[in-house]
Image (cartoon, rainbow, N blue to C red):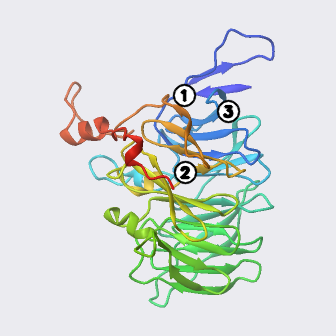
Amino acid sequence: MRLLFYGVALVCLALPSQIAAPEPSGWALTIAWSPDGETIAVGSSDGLWFFDDAFNVVGFAATPQFEGFPPTTMDWSADGGLIALAINWIPFYHQDGQFYTGDFPILIVDADSREVIKAIEFPRPSSGIRWHPQERLILVGALGGPAHILNAATGDSEYVFDKETTGGKRVTAEAVCWVSDSVAALFAANATYVVDIANDELLHLIDRRGNGYDGQAADCNGNGGAINDIGNHHDLATGQISRAYTMDNNFTMGDYWRHVLAIAGIAYSPDGAKIATNGNSSLCRTAVFDGRNHQLIAELQGSYARFGRHYFRDSIAWHPSSEKLAIVGQFDIRIWDAETYELLQRFDGFNAGYYNPHPKARQAGEPETPRQREMRELRCPDFPASMLFKK
């Protein structure tokens, strides 16, 4: 196995070796469990790390194509052979407010060799990636551009949903998911588009005008339903939409995160029975809801500060059995039992605090600004168990 670092190559021979496994580094933003449940992939600013569920390092893939930016969206192929990862637009802002204008590649990593085998050039930052349920095709949302379906082997675009809204604007997809083998759901800021890819037909336009935000987060439950970032439930078969009420109908799932306008990350468990959500750091917790009646089930300890919900869209990962839940944060990674909500594992190996690979130019030795210091030092407190709800 070859382990690549920036300008450093370590060769691990098949024979016994004194070379130790690399120490995880960088700023981690994304996490995803392999389809067989044996491996956890964590995307950081230094590369893609592979762990077992006890957080032993089992592999590493360098991602120099990202120039030190951490991936913000990631997904395993259904067969577990490949991982696709890309960068959203928020990390591309320099500290001085200038927009980074480099390329926005989508990287394909071989899960066995732990190497980047394909870098697909993409014209826009990728707001969401989902592999096809059966084939090695990738559904990609694009901020400020149309959604694509890309061939992972060739990098070619096999389908583009390049339509106009009633207002004459092009449809953009800020979150995406597969409804079936041939139907996709594209979540824009103010509408959801259910598209028959095979026939290039718009099946439903679910209007949410006035009820969406830039940086839409959403997920599908695998049974024709979806939840978006303000707690709207979508019936993707009929095109109907309703509020997802919880806690004896006193407030909605979106209301739980009202102080941050919307949910930052949302993920159905593979069996569709539960929904894990997170929001801004001020609440310092992850909330788990019942996937059917939307009742609050549990609140889990938060461990990090988020500055911008775009950063943490894919920070929640369910085990394929739905029995465990992994959450990557700015300061650690935690694995929870999804039945008892007891903490099973905690890993603190990644760098914490403020991260910006392209800081504003300043003279050597110049001190940090107050904002830099605040972002680097702020952590969530450890709450006593009595302050976290468990049904």
- Name the residue beneath numbered marker 2: 316
Q: Whole-percent x and y of residue 207?
A: 50, 85
Label 3 amino acid?
Asp
Q: Give the answer, above or below, for where 115 lies relative to 147.
A: above
Could you tell me residue 281's position as x and y percent? 35, 50
Q: Residues within 10 Å of mark 2 (few under 14, many from 20)?
A: many
Q: What residue is shown with label 1?
A: 24
Q: CA distance from mark 3 to mark 2?
A: 17 Å
Residue nearest the viewer, comparing 164 with 316 = 316
Kind of residue sitting beneath label 2 = Ile
- Looking at the image, which residue is at 67% across and 48% down? 323
Q: Which label lies toward us, 1 or 3?
A: 3
Classify 10 Å Cα crowding around label 1: few (below 14), some (14-19), many (20 and above): many
Q: Residue furthest top?
A: 18
Q: Nearer the viewer, residue 332 or 97?
A: 332
The mark nearer the N terminus, 1 or 3, is: 1
Secondary element at tag 3: loop
